[in-house]
Amino acid sequence: MSEVIHADHHDDHAHGPAKGMLRWLYTTNHKDIGTLYLWFSFAMFLIGGVMALVIRTELFQPGLQFIEPEFFNQMTTNHGLIMVFGAIMPAFVGLANWLIPMQVGAPDMALPRMNNLSFWILPFAFSMMISTLFMEGGGPNFGWTFYAPLSTTYAPDSVTYFIFAVHLMGASSIMGSINIIATILNMRAPGMTLMKMPMFVWTWLITAYLLIAVMPVLAGAVTMMLFDIHFNTSFFNAAGGGDPVMFQHIFWFFGHPEVYIMILPAFGIVSHIIPTFARKQLFGYTSMVYAVASIAFLSFIVWAHHMFTVGMPLAGQLFFMYSTMLIAVPTGVKVFNWISTMWRGSMTFETPMLFAIAFVVLFTIGGLSGLMLAITPADYQYHDTYFVVAHFHYVLVPGALFSIIAAVYFWIPKWTGKMYDESLGKLHFWLSFIGVNVTFFPQHFSGLAGMPRRIPDYALQFADFNMISSIGAFIFGFSQVFFLYVLIKTIRSGAPAKGRSWEGAKGLEWTLPSPAPYHSFTYPPEVKNEEVHG
Amino acid sequence: MKNQILRMLPGAVALLASGAAIADELNMRVGVTDISRQVYDLHMTIFYICVAIGVVVFGVLFWSVFRHRKSLGAVPATFHESTKMELAWTIVPTLILIVMAIPATKVLVAMYDTGGEDMNIEVRGYQWKWQYKYLDEDYNNSFSFFSNLATPKSQIKNRSVKTDNYLLEVDEHLRIPINRKVRFLVTSEDVIHAWWVPDFGIKRDAVPGMLNELWAIVEEPGIYRGQCTELCGKDHGFMPIVVEAMPEAEFDAWYATKVSSEVVRQESMTKTFTHDELMVQGEGIYGTYCSSCHMANGEGVPPVFPAIAGSTVAMGPRDDHLSLVINGVAGSAMQAFGKQLDAVQLASVVHYQRHAFGNDAGDISQPQDVINLSNGQ
C-alpha cells in the first residue's frame, strides 16, 4: 500500500512543484532549494548589514554616543559570523544548486533529500545564534575568530548556543559539499570530460573539497571549547597546562581555507561573465583550472600568517611569509587571464559585466594589500588595525559579494524567465561601487595611522576617515535595499527573457528555455564543442 | 616673474608642510628606532611595487575597456590560449616576489636579534590595563606599577570637551632610557592582549602562560603612544600604552627614586597604621579600583555590582571581607585584587569600605592581617 502512495507522489513531482507553502518545506528540487538558499542568504545579508550600520553609526564620531562597548563587541562578532556563514557561503551554495545541474546537463542534484536537509538546518542554526543576543549576558562578543580564552573562560553563558549553532552550520556545509561533489563527478552529460567543465563547476568542485577538509577542524575547535567550558578540560587554558595559541592554529587551519571557500566560486562566476560580454572565449582555461587548484593547495599551508604577532620562532615566521607570498602567483595568473579575455574582445557593459570588472579591479586592490600584509616585519605594523579591515573587506565585499550580485543579474533571466531593468541595474552598480570605496578605502589610511580594529571609540586623529567611512556604509547599505527592489520588480514585471539571454552566453544552461524547466535536463544533452568553456 | 615665484615660495613651503602633516594621518609612522625606520622603508618599497603592478595591470584593463568595445565596432579576436604568456606571467611575478622577500627577510632577522639587552621590563596585560615590572638585577629592588587609562569618563560620554590625547593618556607612563637596548617580556594575566608601540615598530601578543620577547633602542626622547591591538573584551578600546623615552641620566635618577620608594613600600608592609591614615589612603584606592563598578557613593548597580553601603560583607567578619577582595568572586565581574594591590593598599581599601558610606564595622585592618591571610594563617 505504502509503495503505491509513494509511486503516486513520484508522478506528481515529475510535473512540477507541490502546491502551497509546504512546497518549500518538502522540496527536493535543486531550483527550489537554490531559491531558498539565495533568499535566506539575502535575509542574513540584510541582518548582518544592519549590524554593520550599528557599528558605523557608533563610529561616526569619537566618543560613545549610541551603544555600550559590550554591545559593540556583540555587533562586530555577529556581523562577521552572519556575513561569513549566513550570507556569503549560503549564497554560493544557492548558486551551486541552481547552476551546477544545468551546467553539467543533469536533471537535479545527486542527493536531493540531503539537499533539503542541508538547507533546512540553516534557519534553525542562525535563529539560535541570533537569539543569544537577547539572552542574559548577551550573545557572542569575542570576535568572529572567537579566540580562547576570551571565548571560553571569559565568555558569556550563551557561548554554548553559539557552539551548537556552529556545529549545525558545519554539518550543513559538509552535506552540501558531498552533494556537490557527487553531482559533479557522477551526473555530467556524456562527453563532458573534466577539462570541458564550466569554470563555475570546477571552482565549486575544489571549494567543496576544501569544505569537507576544514569544516571538521572547526567542529573540533568548538568541541574543545565546549569541553573547556563545561567539562573542566584545559585544551586552551594555560593555567591547566593548555595553550591558547593552539586554538589559533586550529582555528586558522580552518579559517584560511575558509577564506578561499568564499572566493573560489567567485572566480568561477567571473570566468563566465567576462567571456560572455567580451564575446570571446575565456583565455587560458587550463591554466585557470590549475591556478584554482594551486590556490586551494596553498590555502592549507599559510594559516599562521594570521598569527605573525603571536610569538612564533623566526623559521616559522619565514616559512609562512614565503608561502603566503606564493599565493600571489596563481592569483595573478587568474587576473591576467581575465584581462587577456577582455583584450581585443567586443565588449558591452551590462550590469553583470560592470560588477565583474569592478570585481577584477577591486579584488586586485585587496590582493595587493594582502601581499603587503604577507611581509612579516611590516605586518607587525598592520596587524589588527583597520588596514586589515580594509584588506579583507576589499576581497569580500567587492570580491565575493559583487560576484554574487553579478551572478544574480547574469542568471536571473534563466531562473525567472524575466529580464531585469537595465538602467536600474546600472544605478544599483554605481551606488554600490561608490559606496564600497567610500566605506573601505579610507580604512587603509586609518589603519596605517594606527587605529586598532574592534574598538568602539577612537583617538581624535582618526575622526575624519571614520566619518567618511560611515557615510559610505550608509550609501552602500541603502543601495542593497534598492537591489531588493530591483529583484522584486524583475520577478513581478520583468520583460520576457530569451533562452539564450545574452548574445555571447555559452554553456548548457543557455540551451534550455527561460525559465528553465523544473527538472533541468530529463535526457542527457549533447555536449557540443562550441558550448563548452562558457 | 622671478619675484612672483619667490613670493609664492613660502606658500608652497606651507603647503608642503601641511602635506607632510596630512601624510602623518595617511601613512605608517617612520618611528624613532632603527627597526621602525627599516620597517617603514620596507613598507614603502612593497607599496611602490604594488602601485607599479596596479598601474600596469589596470592600465591594460582600462585600455581594453575603452578600446575594445562593441559600440566602437570592435570585432572579437579568436585567440584563447598561449603557453608562453602563461609562463611569462607565472615567472615574472615569482621574480618580483623574490625581490620583495630579500629585504623582508633581512628586516625580520634583525628584529629577532634579541639578547645583549641593557634592561628588562615585564609587560603584563590585564582586563583592561597594563602592568609594567622593572626587573632589577637585585630581585628585591624590582618594582612594578599599573598604567590605567586617564581619559575621564565625561569625555568618553561626550559630557566634556575631548582633549588632545583622548583615549591615549594613562595615569603613569612606562619610562625607558634612550640609546639603551630595552627588552620587553610580554605576557598576560587573563585573556590575550597585544602590546603595540607604532613608533618603535614592534607589536606582540600578550598571551596568558607565554612570555614573548620584544626589544627597542629608542633614539629620541619623547612620549610615544599605542593601544591594545587584540580584542580582549569590553574595554579593549580603553587600555592605551604610553611610553616615555628619557635621556639616560634623567632616567637613572627616576629609576633610583623608584627603587628607594620601593624599599619604603616594602618596609611599610610591617607598619601599623592608624584609622585616619587608612581612611585617607583607602579613599584614593577606592576611587581608582572600586568606584567604576561599586560607584563613588558605595551604592553599586545591583544586581550586577552589589552595594557596599550597608552590605553584609562590609558589616560582617573582617577576614571574610579581606579574602573576598584578595581572591575575587569566581564567575562574576569581581576581580582578584590580591595580584594587583599590595598589602597596605588592600588593608586600607577594605578598612575604608568598612567605615565609609555609613558603614561602621568598628574594627581595623592592617597590612599584616592581609599577609597572614594570604599565607593561609
Image: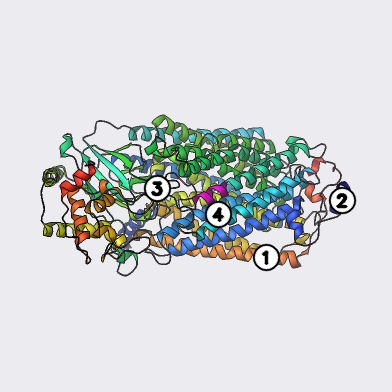
Please name which of the two marks, 2 or 4, marks the residue nearer to the observer.
2
Which numbered disc, 3 or 1, marks the residue closer to the eye?
3
Residue designated by label 2:
A5
Q: Is A160 contained in the magenta span?
A: yes
Disc 2 is placed on an element classified as helix
Which type of secondary structure does the marked residue at label 4 adopt? helix
Quadrant (top left, top right, bottom left, bottom right) of the N terminus of chain B: bottom left
- The amino acid pointed to by label 1 is Val
Q: Earlier in the sequence, mark 1 or mark 2?
A: 2
User: Which residues are the magenta region?
Assistant: A145-166
Label 2 sits on what residue type?
Ile
| Amino acid type for the residue under numbered disc 4 | Met
Tag 1 secondary structure: helix
Host chain of mark 4: A
Instruction: Left or right? Give the position of B327 relative to A105.
Output: left
Q: Amino acid at mark 3?
A: Glu
SS assignment at label 3: loop
- Vertical side of A343 occupied by A132: above or below: below
> CA–CA distance between discs 4 and 1?
30 Å
Mark 4 or mark 1: name the one nearer the start of the chain. Answer: 4
Q: Look at mark 3 in the image and give the residue it sits on.
A: B230
Residue B377's spot in the image, x, y percent? 21, 42
Mark 3 residue crowding within 10 angstroms, few (<14) / some (14–19) / many (20+): many
Q: Which residue is mark 1?
A: A486
Front residue of B194 and A388: B194
